[in-house]
Image (cartoon, helix red, strand yellow):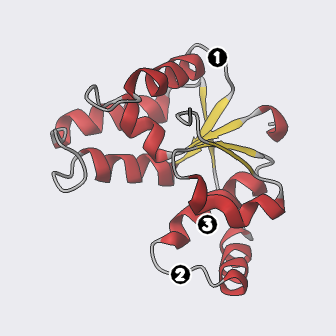
Amino acid sequence: MKGSDWVGIDTNVLVIADNPSHPHHFQARKILEDVLRKAVKGCLSHQVLAEYYAVVTSPQKIEQPLSAEEAKARVLYLEKVRSLKKIYPKRSTLKRCVMFCAEKDIRGARFFDAFYAMNLLDNGVHKLITQNVKDFIPFKERGLEVVDPFQT
C-alpha cells in the first residue's frame, strides 16, 4: 500500500459517527461514508476496532451505549469491509514505540495513541483524522499530519 495516499481513522471518529446526539455526528458519518465508498482511502488497525467496541458498549463513556450484539455486528462489518484498509504492526513497531515513548516521557493510557501513531507511520500512513489532536503532537516530528475534521 502506498501510505501517502491513505488516511488513518481514529477511534473517536467511528464513535462520533455512531452517536446521533453528538454535535459532529453528520461530519463523522460523512467521513466514514466517504471511506466506505472509496472517495477517501481510509485505514485503521484492529487496535482501533477494539477501542471502538470498548467505548460504544460503555455507559461510562457514552450516553446511549450499544448492546454487545450491536457492537459486535458493527466491529465485524468494519473489520470485513475491504474499502477500509486494515494496517498491522511491523515486527519492530512495539520496540520503536516503547523507545519513542520513553524518550518523550509518554506514559499510561497515552501509550495506546502512541502505538497507533507508530503503526500508521510504520505502514507509510502520514495523515490521521482524529478529534484528539493533542494526543498525537509528539508524532508530528516523525511526519504524521494530524487533522481534526470537526475544528471550525
Identify whether 77 is placed above or below 66.
above
Closer to the eye: label 3 or 1: 3
The residue under the point 31% across, 32% down is 22
Which mark sits nearer the N-terminus, 2 or 3? 2
In the image, taking residue 76 as reference, residue 82 lies left or right, namely right
Label 2 Cα neighbours within 10 Å, binned few <14 / some 14-19 / many ≥20? few
Closer to the eye: label 2 or 1: 2
Name the quarter where the C terminus is drawn: top right
Q: Secondary structure at mark 3?
A: helix
Residue type of the residue flagged with mark 2: Arg
The residue under the point 39% across, 29% down is 17
The picture places residue 140, in percent across and down from the top left corner, at: 77, 58
Query: Which circle marks residue 38 in the picture?
Result: 1
The residue under the point 76% across, 55% down is 121
In the image, taking residue 104 as reference, residue 54 lies left or right, namely left
Which mark sits nearer the N-terminus, 2 or 1? 1
Name the quarter where the N terminus is drawn: top right
In the picture of the structure, the residue carrying the numbered disc 2 is 107
Q: Are marks 2 and 3 in contact (CB under 8 Å)?
A: no
Label 3 Cα neighbours within 10 Å, binned few <14 / some 14-19 / many ≥20? many
Q: Of residues 79 and 152, which is closer to you in this image?
A: 152
In the picture of the structure, the residue carrying the numbered disc 3 is 114
Q: Quadrant of residue 100?
A: bottom right
Q: Of residues 151 and 110, which is closer to you in this image?
A: 151
The picture places residue 145, in percent across and down from the top left corner, at: 75, 47
Residue type of the residue flagged with mark 3: Ala
Which mark sits nearer the N-terminus, 3 or 1? 1
In the image, taking residue 135 as reference, residue 59 lies left or right, namely left
The residue under the point 69% across, 26% down is 41
Residue type of the residue flagged with mark 1: Lys
Identify whether 42 is placed above or below 59.
above
